[in-house]
Amino acid sequence: MQYSCYSIPFLFVIGVVLSPTTALAHQHYHRCTAKFYELTKSKNMSRCLRLPTLGAEMGWSAPLLKNCHHVFEVVFGAPVREEKGWLAWGVNPTPEGRMVGTRAAIGIKDPSGPPHCKTYSVGYETRRACGPLRPRDVEEMKCLRFEYDSRTEYYHLTATLNLSSTDYNVSKLHIVWQSGFDADGDVPKKHVSDLKNIDSFETVDLVSGQCSDMAFIKIFLRQVHGIMNIIGWGTMLPVGVIIARFFREFPIQTNDGWYYFHVSCQSIGFSIGAIGWGIGIWLAHSSPHHIFFTHHVLGIIIFVFATLQTLAIRFKPGKTDDFRKLWNIYHHFLGYALLPLIFINIFEGIRILKPDNKNTWKLAVIGILTALGVITFILEAYTWKEFIDEKKDQKKDATRICESTKEDQRAGSINKHQHGSEINHDGSKGQHPVSSQHPLANTPSTQQGNNTPNI
Ligand SMILES: *[C@@H]1O[C@H](CO)[C@@H](O)[C@H](O)[C@H]1NC(C)=O
Ligand SMILES: *[C@@H]1O[C@H](CO)[C@@H](O)[C@H](O)[C@H]1NC(C)=O
Ligand SMILES: *[C@@H]1O[C@H](CO)[C@@H](O)[C@H](O)[C@H]1NC(C)=O
């Protein structure tokens, strides 16, 4: 019986491990689109790379070493839809290779004239938005052109680079790219902080044309993080709660069978969720300047309380303990309170992720929620129906017993109708197991200690 719980993560593992589409997508990732490839060819560039974000692609000529300087040409293209949009491509000599410290060529679409292109040096004050990013000459590059290409429908900038081999290793060059939607003359305005903007850096080997795949790995891990938490915390934990709520004595009265179901669902769900959570924390640390505060804090709260709930397997008070009743209230309250938090955070995660198939993700989660809701509703209605039927039967039986008692004995056994167990003996309709208990008996306030085995 318990094994049905294991099938969900099992299917998931199969799905992840046997996803050759992932590998194919990976291959496909680096290959330039045919049109952009044509563009680089026409510029005599031998290398081409599709970048993982913002729909960007780049091509370059083989770097030539002259007087300890690598000299080459780069073309960088991406779609720019906004009227005053801009595109940036740069190199960063620091090992982290992020925005700060980048020397960049930035091309700006100008509604009042031809698109233009300048070089910039991005400092800390730019990240903190403490001042405008003004053009200045840098020794690393010169921007030659920024123009629209109707075949690729990209704007693309062409730059010549001259990188000192003491500062830059062209086999391990940290590149950064970006696109924004507004500019003021020569000054590009801050870009949005979506994941695709945050992920826009990579380490590239200009000699072999390989890249480190960091952005690709992060994009992949975010999906894994999302799927694991939707399955672990968004599906298994609620199923475990439903088991504890409705299956104590239904559909078959087992000796604590529900408890093993509950514990196995919750521990598997917790394990999957915890791995997903760990991946999430790693992802947050990999972009420390862009923490998604709500998602991050909610994630930590959920993890801490889910851990407390899971520790109950070992550390709950004994069945006969005076403290037990109070503990049950706490355990149930926390369990129910966690569920809305989990779903809020799942939707928050999807909002941040902005996956291409965003609607599929949302529909999947809404589907899970609806299924859980419908199951809960049906079980709740069924339990109440059984309870009401049972109450009616008890009343009928009780009156009959009272009448027969009056007739037969006329003695003072008025208390007798309170003992439900004796009702069955007079051959009346058999009781359904569920109905022997008030439906709310499973909720904290009326929890009966003997329902829960002491493990
Ligand atoms: C590309 O190379 C060919 C042959 O070396 C040359 O004739 C042509 O002018 C070059 N084109 C550009 C855009 O540099
Ligand atoms: C590259 O830069 C160095 C130092 O600024 C300069 O001496 C050299 O002439 C430049 N090379 C080219 C090809 O522009
Ligand atoms: C440049 O990077 C490559 C690849 O990581 C490495 O093998 C090489 O030693 C580096 N060169 C220098 C001068 O640091």
Image (cartoon, rainbow, N blue to C red):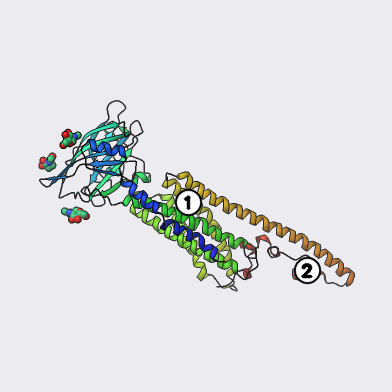
- Foreground of the two, 31 or 160: 31
Instruction: Kindly identify which residue carries mark 1.
Output: 346
The image's mark for residue 22 is: none
| Callout 2 secondary element | helix
For ligand 2, which image quadrant applies? top left
CA distance separating discs 1 and 2: 50 Å
Q: Tell me: 51 left or right of 440.
A: left
| Residue type for callout 1 | Ile
Q: Quadrant of the N terminus?
A: bottom right
- Whether 21 is drawn above or below 133: the answer is below
Q: Position of residue 354 (x, y in %)?
A: 42, 45
- Foreground of the two, 59 or 439: 59
Q: Tell me: 401 left or right of 298.
A: right
Q: Residue furthest left?
A: 67
Q: Residue furthest top?
A: 112
Instruction: Kindly identify which residue carries mark 2.
Output: 423
Task: Tell me the crowding category of disc 2: few under 14, some 14 to 19, or many 20 or more residues within 10 angstroms, Cα based.
Answer: many
> Between disc 1 and disc 2, whose residue precedes?
1
